[in-house]
Image: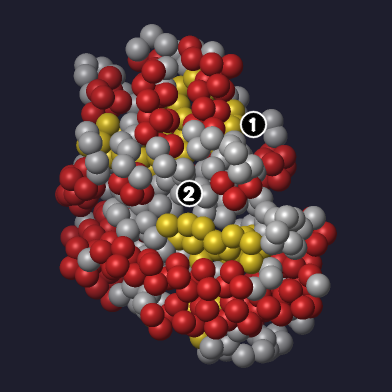
Amino acid sequence: MATASQSVDTGLQQLARRHLWMHFSRMGAYDADHEIPIISRAEGCYVYDEHGNRYLDGLSGLFCVNAGHGRSEYGEAAARQVEELDFYTLWSYAHPRAIELAARLASLAPGELNRVFFTNGGSEAVESALKLSRNYHRMHGKGQKHKLIAREVAYHGTSMGALSATGITELRTQFEPMTPGGCHVPNTNVYRWPDDREPTWAADAIEERIVFEGPESVAAVILEPVQNAGGCFVPPDGYFQQVREICNRYDVLMISDEVICAWGRLGHYFGCERFDYVPDIITVAKALTSAYAPMGAMIASDTVAAPFMEGNASFAHGFTFAGHPVAAAVAMANLDVYEREDLCGHVLAKEGEFRQMLESLRDLPIVGDVRGAGFFQAIEMVKDKDTKESFNDEESERLLRGFLSAELYKRGLICRADDRGDPVIQLAPPLIADTEQFEEIHDVLSTVLAEAWDQVVR
């Protein structure tokens, strides 16, 4: 476990502060007395900083190192591929690993989702799905269908098209005006719903928005199986089945954004399997390679792909490095591990124990809700459990960034303390995590959340 942070102004620290621009980071917070956390090695469920302190990686990197750290066979697969074919583009060419991986993904995907379009990551996968949705309708003489229905507080990526789907105001305002067409509807944060609200309410809101915008103008609905931002919002029973019916009724494509929820995070290869629906397009990335190499994909149904498979038609979109041979070889090795070790089965077998551990924290006065699915869980923090009163912006800043984030890290647990929505702690450990790791998480959370209540809230 970690010890108190050492204020050592190492050469790496100096270089990082001078030259490295970290993502979504307040760079001004780091100086000689406030270190940048530098993770230097990793193994299994744990990572180590430059001082040798050990941390339980309770976020799997960023929801992506699902098979765990330090698997040498992935590097060996990459090395073999470099010796055979280091790189070739998929622009008008193909190579064996991309072909084999596409066929393997198609064999795992539900329904008729058989066409795999590779990308380098999640935002690119979403961007590809949005462009395909517009182009698909245009190919059928319905070019006016361009709008996208997404959910409030949902995160779908940072590229300009994906950002139009992202429903987090503070991530959008710096870059406005957005790509036209993004429309937002309520999410499934059932904890915040009135007790008498109908379970179908959030799905009804999607239909109402489609009708309001005009079905002739709406191209697609994009939803995560479990919504990440806001803290692991799960759907009410029947939600996705109703959304599927709505999309069919109004000739709107259904995109399942599974950049986080695919590859075992919910106990299945694809999150839509967990909730028993078949979308028209699935977007994936992150754990496709367990993050050992950058890779993403858009998986489309035969119906959606069909207009681009005939005559002179072409989907005029792509990325130089998408489907990279080395990344594809790593993805194949990753899927071999999934099959050999039955990682999806392990999640299904152990999620009850993981959830029970988190549920035991409800006794703490700061814990308002525990929710999620599989190895993707969240704790929502409140000021008053009875009224569900949350924290204002100043209080959230003091709670999350002034205390929780640093204290959790100091005590050896990496997780997400976030307030995109109400304040939550999110946990998504590697799929190999077991009782030992659950107990470590409990010991840290129980102590730190109790201290947070005593020092920050009460």
Q: How many labels were placed on the picture?
A: 2
Mark 1 neighbour density, 10 Å: few (under 14) some (14–19) many (20 or more) = some
The answer to whether residue 121 is above or below residue 61 is: above
Along the viewing direction, whichever of 240 and 21 lies nearer the viewer? 240
Along the viewing direction, whichever of 260 and 452 lies nearer the viewer? 452
Q: Which residue is mark 1?
A: 178
Indicate which disc, 1 or 2, sits on the residue closer to the N terminus: 1
Indicate left or right for 184 with 322 as reference: right
Q: Position of residue 375 (x, y in %)?
A: 41, 63
Q: Which residue is mark 2?
A: 234
Along the viewing direction, whichever of 283 and 377 lies nearer the viewer? 377
- Amino acid carrying label 1: it is Met
Secondary structure category for the residue under label 2: loop
Asked whether residue 249 appears in the rendered view, the answer is: yes
- Amino acid carrying label 2: it is Val
Q: How is the image coloured?
A: secondary structure
Q: CA distance from mark 1 to mark 2?
A: 28 Å
The answer to which image quadrant residue 405 occupies is: bottom right
Please report the residue visible at 59 percent of the width from the left and 77 percent of the height from the top: 445
Q: Position of residue 253 (x, y in %)?
A: 39, 26
The answer to which image quadrant residue 115 occupies is: top left
Q: Position of residue 240 (x, y in %)?
A: 40, 36
- Residue mark closest to the camera, 1 vs 2: 2
Please report the residue visible at 30 percent of the width from the left and 75 percent of the height from the top: 71
